[in-house]
């Protein structure tokens, strides 16, 4: 059967702006010119195994590996026969140097409480908690489920699992008890870790209560460790529930890192598929560790004295790779903030950056769009001159939002690294390097060394330069997923069956004449209007460039004549919904990208339905647009009310 959304895409977006790396950034960068980047990429291309094998020397090996890669498509084994330990690489490896007393984590709670843990202090806590895990009967290969606020103990728990070879499964602390129970069951989790509650916009999220309901339906979970975070009342079940602080008070601070095989599972992380049940993406120790470390160093150009802040929650892959494993194995100082960006007011992030003198800031387009909506005053009243590099991840960034980020947050001096990657890829795959790559707003620019993307049509043939198509990866890389937990068939089907021999990312993209990549959205987000395949992001970017529009989502609905008609949902930062503005917006898109993309319907909404990680759920909007009922998995919806409200909102 042919896929109606497969094949080539027409592009209507023409972004001509380009920003060279600022000379003062290049002057001190580790990779400081386009030539230096190219040389590294070429070296990896010429002999990938030699390239990764050499870099692997930066990790600690209890036993050296015999072979860099064993590739039996679609199964990869990296650093075969070697023994390492991710927790050792993140902690012990720094204890013989000046990093021992350097801040590993600088944390601020939402109420304003703060904590600093040096590498030595973090090491001690991790060793103690690793002993706690052992005491509770957790050993190598056992799955530990975590449902926690963004507190240092979450990082401590992950590193403690890694230390003894237990497999962690972090569930973002916004999911329902049903979602926890599903994931616990799928992973056959043995231990649950949670907190009494977490802070969010001044209110307490009752985490333990949610976990209690989940554990009723999680027969594999035998015990539960509870961190006291807010001091709120919780019920503790005798024999099953234990207080974190009580266990830690008894625990020895001595715990050698276990020498573990390179391919020891490190974690499972559930991510939603386009339909059906969430997939447990599996990552393993050595390859993931190396990939997170090197990509962190390349993309953020980290220097020893920098303070780095990634706003992602540890419940997402971004938090795994770029709050915990990447930066800590690189010996970085990581800033962590527990709460909401608009508490006690919309200036919280900028106040934090000013007070701590943050140098590198990594966030998501959904957050940037919210900042824009809240108004510039929150930003301009703060001194953000410490910032040197800005990053984004999670969705395509509309060029207008990119420009705002560049000018208002970066003061025009900071390169923006628009990083494309996925839960499945383990780490960043395509991104500018701050000191080396000229940027273009809306493009994730070029592949990192060792990464070989291609763009193909439905037959798997390369498309003509400039045309859009399916984004695939030609070669395995150390950070790649090792499978879907317990579902080999789905792993093969999802990623390796449509284009033989290549990893199918599930995104559409195009490459321009400079070899720059432009992500055009998920494969199933494509519109087909009167024979033209249009990407949702291009229409959305046009809408967001209108001064009254805060956010936009474009979807198709069946149309007898055009195949698909374009329906757009917009939220406004100014102006009043109504016929006049509707026409103005249609006209605006027409002017920006042409008549073919002019929306047939413009619908105004108070908010858009999003996944918990902030991605717009176009699949649901498609159902709303075409009037059909919602089907499939909605456990990742931010707010179910949003959907009901949207159906009622003015049409
Ligand atoms: O569609 C792409 C989009 O997010 C998807 C991966 O989502 P997830 O596994 O939740 O991981 C998000 C954090 C890595 C991709 O398939 N995406 C991610 N980054 C970008 C992006 N789309 C465009 N530009 C990006 N920089």
Image: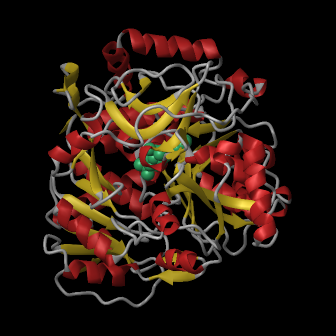
Task: Name the foreground residue: 118 vs 296.
Answer: 296
Q: Residue at x 71, y 48 (%)?
A: 542
Q: Residue at x 13, y 64 (%)?
A: 137
- Asked if residue 34 is positioned above or below residue 489 in the image, the reply reads above
Residue closest to the far top: 46
Task: Name the foreground residue: 495 vs 349.
Answer: 495
Q: Position of residue 232 (x, y in %)?
A: 45, 87
- Asked if residue 277 is positioned above or below residue 518 in the image, the reply reads below
Q: Residue at x 20, y 28 (%)?
A: 73
Q: How is the image coloured?
A: secondary structure
**Viewed as shown, does residue 27 lie left or right of 189?**
right
Q: Quadrant of residue 471?
A: top left
- Asked if residue 408 is positioned above or below residue 573 in the image, the reply reads above
Task: Name the foreground residue: 50 vs 553.
Answer: 553
Q: Position of residue 390 (x, y in %)?
A: 66, 42
Q: Residue at x 53, y 30 (%)?
A: 510
Q: Quadrant of the C terminus?
A: bottom right
Q: Quadrant of the N terminus?
A: top left
Q: Quadrant of residue 337?
A: bottom right
Q: Position of residue 203 (x, y in %)?
A: 55, 83
Q: Is residue 95 visible?
A: no
Q: Is residue 580 visible?
A: yes
**Viewed as shown, does residue 138 lie left or right of 649?**
left
- Asked if residue 148 is positioned above or below residue 486 in the image, the reply reads below
Q: Position of residue 107 (x, y in %)?
A: 56, 60
Count of labels in the image: 0
Task: Name the foreground residue: 332 vs 288.
Answer: 288
Residue closest to the far front: 561
């Amino acid at each position: 059967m042919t896929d109606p959304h497969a094949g080539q895409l027409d592009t209507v977006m023409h972004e001509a702006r380009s920003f060279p790396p600022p000379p003062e950034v290049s002057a001190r960068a580790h990779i400081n010119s386009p030539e230096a980047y190219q040389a590294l990429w070429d070296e990896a291309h010429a002999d990938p195994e030699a390239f990764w094998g050499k870099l692997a020397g930066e990790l600690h090996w209890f036993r050296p590996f015999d072979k860099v890669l064993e590739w039996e498509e679609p199964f990869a084994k990296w650093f075969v026969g070697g023994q390492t330990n991710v927790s050792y690489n993140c902690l012990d490896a720094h204890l013989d140097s000046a990093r021992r007393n350097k801040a590993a984590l600088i944390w601020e709670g939402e109420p304003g409480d703060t904590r600093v843990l040096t590498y030595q202090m973090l090491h001690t806590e991790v060793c103690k908690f690793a002993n706690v895990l052992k005491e509770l009967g957790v050993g190598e290969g056992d799955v530990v489920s975590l449902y926690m606020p963004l507190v240092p103990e979450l990082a401590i728990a992950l590193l403690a699992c890694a230390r003894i070879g237990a497999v962690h499964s972090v569930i973002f602390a916004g999911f329902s008890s049903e979602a926890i129970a599903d994931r616990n069951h799928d992973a056959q989790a043995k231990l649950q870790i949670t907190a009494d509650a977490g802070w969010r916009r001044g209110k307490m999220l009752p985490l333990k209560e949610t976990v209690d309901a989940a554990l009723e339906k999680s027969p594999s979970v035998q015990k539960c460790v509870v961190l006291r975070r807010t001091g709120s009342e919780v019920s503790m079940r005798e024999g099953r529930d234990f207080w974190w602080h009580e266990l830690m008070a008894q625990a020895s601070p001595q715990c050698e890192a276990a020498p573990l095989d390179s391919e020891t599972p490190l974690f499972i992380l559930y991510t939603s598929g386009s339909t059906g049940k969430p997939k447990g993406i599996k990552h393993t120790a050595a390859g993931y560790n190396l990939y997170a470390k090197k990509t962190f160093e390349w993309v953020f150009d980290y220097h020893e004295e920098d303070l780095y802040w990634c706003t992602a929650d540890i419940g997402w892959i971004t938090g795994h790779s770029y709050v915990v494993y990447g930066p800590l194995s690189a010996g970085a100082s990581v800033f962590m903030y527990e709460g909401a960006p608009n508490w006690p007011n919309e200036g919280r992030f900028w106040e934090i950056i000013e007070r701590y003198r943050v140098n590198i800031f990594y966030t998501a387009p959904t957050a940037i769009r919210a900042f824009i909506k809240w108004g510039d005053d929150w930003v301009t009243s703060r001194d953000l001159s410490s910032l040197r590099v800005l990053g984004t991840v999670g969705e395509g960034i509309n060029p207008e939002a990119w420009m705002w980020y560049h000018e208002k947050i970066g003061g025009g001096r900071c390169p923006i690294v628009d990083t494309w990657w996925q839960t499945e890829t383990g780490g960043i795959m395509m991104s500018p390097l701050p000191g080396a790559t000229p940027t273009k707003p809306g493009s994730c620019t070029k592949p990192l060394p060792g990464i070989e993307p291609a763009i193909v049509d439905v037959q798997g043939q390369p498309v003509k330069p400039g045309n859009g198509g399916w984004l695939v990866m030609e070669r395995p890389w150390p950070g790649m997923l090792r499978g879907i937990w317990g579902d080999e068939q789905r792993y093969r089907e999802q990623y390796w069956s449509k284009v033989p021999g290549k990893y199918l990312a599930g995104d559409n993209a195009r490459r321009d004449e400079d070899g720059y990549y432009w992500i055009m959205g998920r494969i199933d987000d494509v519109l087909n209007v009167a024979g033209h395949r249009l990407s949702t992001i291009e229409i959305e970017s046009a809408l967001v460039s209108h001064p009254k529009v805060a956010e936009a989502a474009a979807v198709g609905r069946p149309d007898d004549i055009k195949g698909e008609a374009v329906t757009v949902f917009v939220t406004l930062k100014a102006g009043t919904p109504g016929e006049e503005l509707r026409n103005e917006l249609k006209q605006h898109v027409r002017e920006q990208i042409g008549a073919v993309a002019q929306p047939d319907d413009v619908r105004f909404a108070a908010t858009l339905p999003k996944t918990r990680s902030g991605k717009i759920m176009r699949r649901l909007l498609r159902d709303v647009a075409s009037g059909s009922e919602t089907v499939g998995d909605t456990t990742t919806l931010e707010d179910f009310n949003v959907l009901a409200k949207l159906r009622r909102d003015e049409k």
